[in-house]
Amino acid sequence: YGERLMGMKMTLYALIYGKVIWQMIPSKLKEKKFQKPWHAQIFAITVSLSENKVFEWNEFSDFLAHEIKMDNNQTRNGSDDYFYSWVKALEKLLIKKKITSFQRMVEIKNLWSSAFLNTPHGKPVKIGDI
């Protein structure tokens, strides 16, 4: 995503406490991957929502900075911490923008949990009509 924004082959961006930091990186680091698939998925969802003008990237960045600050007071467990903060920031922003509600998110999470627990191993998890 950062590469497309700058239009430069070797450019990458990172969010540090909500601020976009641009830097040149060696091309061998260009292939760096997310540590877990869900990290990449939540990143892609957020980028897509921003690109589709659901919210501005700086709005999300502000929410993320706030969540990271709040989460720094809790026990840290490694790489997931950043993306847990990311998810909470995205949820709160979507509620503020009235894209969804807290109640609807709880409902979907419960449907997902039920579907996950009742899906045979190796089969795709399907929530059904939501």
Image (tube, rainbow, N blue to C red):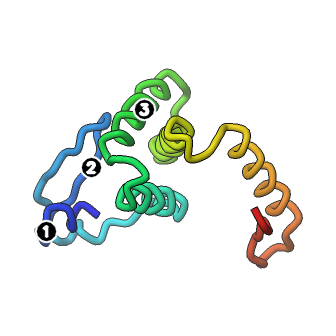
In percent of the image, x 49 and y 44: which residue is there? 90
Q: Mark 2 points at which residue?
A: 14
Q: Which of marks 2 and 1 is in front?
A: 1
Amino acid at dot 1? Gly
Q: Are marks 3 and 2 in contact (CB under 8 Å)?
A: no
Q: Please tell me whether residue 103 is drawn above or below residue 121 in the rendered image.
A: above
In percent of the image, x 20 and y 71: which residue is there? 28
- Dot 3: element: helix
Q: Nearer the viewer, mark 1 or mark 3?
A: 1
31 relative position to 66: left or right: left
User: In the image, which disc is placed on residue 7?
Assistant: 1
On the image, which quarter does residue 27 sit in? bottom left
Horizontal and vertical percent for residue 97?
A: 49, 40
Horizontal and vertical percent for residue 24?
A: 11, 58
118 relative position to 61: left or right: right
Horizontal and vertical percent for residue 85?
A: 49, 39
In percent of the image, x 13 and y 72: which residue is there? 9
Horizontal and vertical percent for residue 70?
A: 47, 24
Amino acid at dot 2? Ala
Q: Can residue 81 be seen in this view?
A: no
Q: Do the residues labelled 2 and 1 touch (CB within 8 Å)?
A: no
